[in-house]
Image: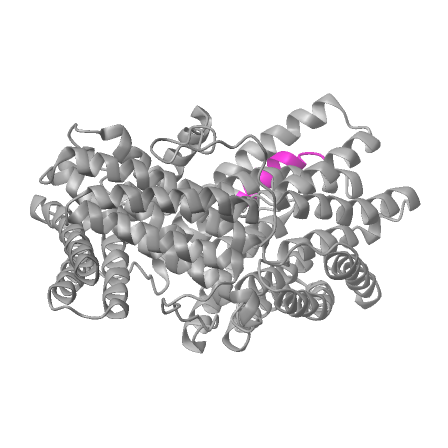
Amino acid sequence: MTGKIGDGVGADVAGRDVDAVPAPPGWVATLRRAARWMELRSFGLTPEHFTFAEGLRAALAVAVPLALVLASGRYQYGWAIFGAYWSCLCDTPGPHRLRRALLALFVILGTPVAFLGSWLASFGTVAALVAAPLIVVLSALLPVRLAHAGLLSALVGGVGVVAVGFPHPAAQAGELALSFMAGSCWAYLLVNVLWRVDAWRPARQMSVAVFTRLGDMLADMVATGDGPHRDGAWHPAHSEHRRAVRFALERLRALIARYEREPEADLRPFLLLQEAAEQLFSAAIALEHDFILREGPARERMAAADAMLEAVLACRATVAEGPRGGDILARQMDALGQLRATLPEGLAAGCLLATQQAAGLVAAAQTGAAVASLLPPVVGDGRIRWQDALKQGVRQAAAVVVVLYVAIVFQFGYPYWATMAVVMVMQGAARVAWTRGLERIFGSLLGGLAALCLLLVSDAPPTLAGVAVLLAGVSIALRSVNYAVFVVFLTMLFIIVTELVQPGAGIGSARILDNTVGSLTAVLAVLLLWPDFGPPVTRLIADGLNTNRAYIDAVRAGRDEGTIAAARRAAGLSSIAAEVALHALGGLLRRWQRLSHEDAAALRELRMLAGEAAAAWHRRLAAGDRQDA
């Protein structure tokens, strides 16, 4: 992990290090609150996924074929632009080995799929209605054998259904496929040879995001002071910080699984960071529990919250900015030890000890020093069962047939936009498809209106080409930040590129209509064909109570640290599953299942049990430390 920390960092061991850990700007705090609100409702907002370098690279990838097509006037080769852009979209976070393999497969599979889709559709409506769903089903089976191939599967299927919207005889279909191959090969060369980015940067960004959310959780405790904690009574955003941290930890865990075959020396620092974050999270839960109940001395918990916040922000700075942050971290570790020595044996002392140990893991991640902690295993096959893949493919195929038939009957100008929307929206269970459908409709509406306004201002090809290149870069940079925002820029990009290479009236309005039809059809298909709403909310609440009781029983029984860590994670995940299910499908499930006030009270009991278990563990940790001393 590399980077630099700027000069001018001052520290006071006894108090707040103001220069090292400034408060975030107001808009940053607002953005983080919005992210927590959206996560509860299954909408993603992860600013840490912004990738400026990949955006610049995508802009160059699109600029070259776009310039060649416009300069030569050979608009039939416009698929080179699509191929280059989709290839950049297919480049997902992970080690270079995985990126090369998935992107190569996209080129290898996408080229014949583009040819077959275009050629078979030329035989008439029936052939198109057979070819499109067949391609979708076959592409949906890719993740059965290929790890981490979900996006590859969706994009290959997308290439197929879009190609069906360009029916051509064999010769012209071959030109279309070759132009796609040329654009995607150029993007492959750019991504994997000419402009390689740091493969570990996503893991570093994700680690920083975890510490950022931990800092937000502790900052709220510091701001609470001796007053009543807002989670003392049930409210719609109850335990929002715990959810935010657990979501971030699970994203980090899933990302690290992609690097499981990388050298241990490269992977070990991120496993240490993951373990450090888990320990800090447990300590923060325990301390928050004390803030909610207000049982211990206020001075102790307030001092502990302040010191833990300083330590977490020092950990974040160390991960984000490199080895020079080690000096700040070392000072914070000393400050934790000094404060702990002044406190009696109890919860606050245990939280400070856990924080000190976690900070040591972060320091070891930077220096490579040996640690006694047992590192978490890297788990995650990245593949799915063939039954699930087949079910997903059949649902997508059915929706594609409906949309394509409607588009043909009502003579949509660009039916492939509707079928592409179906494939991209229908990813996962009903809750995921619901949110993605709403985000795609909203993004298409805003993007279409923005593109229409832009075309009214100027329709000069050089201006539109420059805007298209800019949009390509921005959309790729934002692709994992928020789906709706990504779709806004994606819609603008495709409307403008279509205007350049395939000019026609009503492109913007057609994009809005087609995406809306496709997204709504996808949502209906997920709701009607083998709907997967997950277990009933009441069962999720019961499971959450059981796992949280198992967690506290493990602590009270004196189980080992590994067993307790596993029980803590299971309890956290089950609690989140119940809380998120309350808001699934816009709250419709909650209304359908007629949840009672007793169920809402049980949700609060989940969090109280988790807090009590974490508090018991840290009291035990403090007692053991004093005995060792």
* Front residue (pair 332, 429): 332
- Give the residue drawn at x 26%, y 63%: 570
* Front residue (pair 239, 419): 239
Quadrant of the rendering where the N terminus is positioned: bottom right
Q: Is residue 191 above or below residue 374?
A: above
Quadrant of the rendering where the C terminus is positioned: bottom left
Judge whether residue 353 can be spotted in this image. yes
- Give the residue drawn at x 79%, y 36%: 465
Q: Which residues are magenta?
A: 505-515
548 lies left or right of 198? left
Quadrant of res 533: bottom left
Judge whether residue 589 can be spotted in this image. no
The extreme right residue here reads: 72
- Give the residue drawn at x 42%, y 53%: 433
The extreme front residue here reads: 629
- Give the residue drawn at x 48%, y 37%: 442
* Front residue (pair 448, 509): 448
354 lies left or right of 180? left
Quadrant of res 501: top right
Residue 249 image offset from top left, x and y in percent:
39, 55
301 lies left or right of 249? left
Residue 481 image offset from top left, x and y in percent:
51, 44
Residue 428 image offset from top left, x and y in percent:
42, 60
Q: Is residue 433 above or below residue 100?
A: above
Residue 615 falls inside the magenta stretch? no
* Front residue (pair 559, 461): 559
